[in-house]
């Protein structure tokens, strides 16, 4: 492991950015372990992995050294909590041929990156790929979304179970459950930021994430902007497990950031109430 110089290296075949804040070592270790195996399976040699730590205190990351063996892992820290998007943008200008934005709570199958690269190689129009995702209990997650109405966000994030069940058909349409299955699906409007596999040229052209978002909705925004430049594809052969999170269970600060980012998103892209 080393601090990143962020320059002077030959163009990479693959770059990976993982943003963390006060990380849980056990969770991050599982992510790095699966990433290392997936990179080894691709056979790629020019790969750079950036762990971008937004924590207020600088960590030594000694606990990561064993899992990082054989992995070109570079730690970037000291910038403070600049937000998910701005942290990812630190490495935007040096994104490789392919660039993966990866959450620190994601584990991927060994073949995931190889399958993602093969799909991109076969489909030059694809600029962003989203995977098939599962919860830790094996149930399916739906990472693709239609353009949200305010009601969709309130129901999905904050409504009691009984209310969600009453609006199940509406929420299922929002999560595209009737369209996302075991086949490739082209051009979902919005995909999750937990695993965004970009063609590097498209990520650079987009300018990365909008820095106005500290947390939440930055993936919605970049999905819509990317969709104007290239095609987005859901590719079920790329499989991950994502622990995920819920803003409504994280306290008032997260609720405020959710509301603030929603305001920025709808002000930028257009408001839908219902």
Image (cartoon, grey):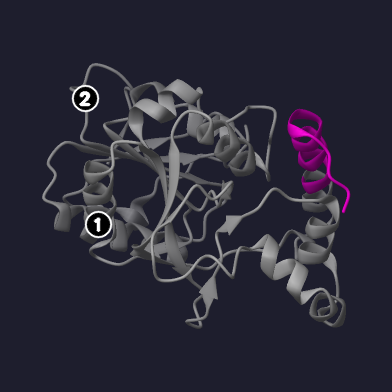
At horizontal 51% and vertical 61% (from top left) the residue drawn is 24
Is residue 222 part of the magenta span, yes or no?
Answer: no
Residue 161 in which image quadrant: bottom right
Specify the segment rendered in magenta.
258-274
Residue 274 in which image quadrant: bottom right
Label 2 or label 1, whichever lies nearer to me, is 1
Vertical order, 203 against 153 (above or below): above
Q: Which residue in the structure is indicated by mark 1?
A: 115
At horizontal 79% and vertical 42% (from top left) the residue drawn is 262
Q: Looking at the image, which residue sits at the far top? A: 8
For label 1, the crowd category at 10 Å Cα-Cα, with few meaning under 14, some 14 to 19 and many 20 or more, is: some
- Left or right of 213? Residue 53 is left
Residue 91 visible to an observer of this rendering: no
Vertical order, 240 against 121 (above or below): below
User: Residue 18: x and y, percent?
Assistant: 44, 45
Residue 154 in which image quadrant: bottom right
Main SS category, magenta section = helix
At horizontal 59% and vertical 37% (from top left) the residue drawn is 224
- Left or right of 67? Residue 270 is right
Residue 144 visible to an observer of this rendering: yes
Q: Secondary structure at mark 1?
A: helix
Q: Which residue in the structure is indicated by mark 2?
A: 11
Mark closer to the chain start, 2 or 1: 2
Is residue 263 part of the magenta span, yes or no?
Answer: yes
Tell me the distance, in whole angstroms, between the alpha carbons under discs 2 and 1.
Answer: 21 Å
For label 2, the crowd category at 10 Å Cα-Cα, with few meaning under 14, some 14 to 19 and many 20 or more, is: some
At horizontal 81% and vertical 31% (from top left) the residue drawn is 267
Vertical order, 82 against 45 (above or below): above
């Amino acid at each position: 492991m080393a601090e990143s110089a962020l320059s002077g290296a030959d163009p990479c075949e693959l770059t990976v950015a993982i943003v963390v804040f006060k990380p849980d070592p056990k969770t991050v270790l599982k992510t790095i372990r699966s990433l290392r195996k997936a990179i080894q399976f691709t056979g790629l040699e020019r790969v750079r992995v950036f762990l971008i730590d937004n924590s207020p205190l600088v960590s030594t990351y000694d606990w990561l050294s064993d899992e990082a063996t054989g992995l070109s892992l570079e730690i970037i820290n000291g910038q403070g909590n600049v937000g998910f998007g701005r942290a990812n943008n630190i490495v935007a200008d040096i994104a490789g041929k392919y660039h993966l934005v990866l959450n620190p709570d994601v584990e991927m199958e060994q073949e995931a990156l190889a399958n993602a690269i093969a799909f991109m190689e076969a489909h030059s129009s694809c600029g962003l790929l989203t995977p098939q995702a599962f919860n830790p209990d094996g149930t399916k997650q739906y990472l693709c979304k239609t353009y949200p109405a305010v009601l969709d966000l309130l129901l999905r994030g904050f409504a009691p179970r009984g209310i969600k069940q009453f609006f199940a058909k509406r929420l299922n349409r929002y999560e595209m459950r009737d369209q996302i299955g075991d086949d490739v699906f082209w051009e979902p409007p919005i995909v999750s930021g937990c695993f965004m596999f970009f063609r590097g040229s498209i990520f650079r052209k987009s300018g990365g994430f909008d820095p106005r978002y500290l947390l939440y909705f930055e993936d919605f925004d970049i999905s819509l902007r990317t969709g104007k430049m290239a095609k987005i594809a859901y590719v079920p052969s790329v499989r991950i497990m994502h622990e995920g999170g819920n803003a409504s269970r994280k306290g008032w600060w997260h609720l405020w950031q959710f509301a603030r980012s929603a305001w920025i998103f709808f002000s930028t892209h257009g408001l839908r109430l219902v």
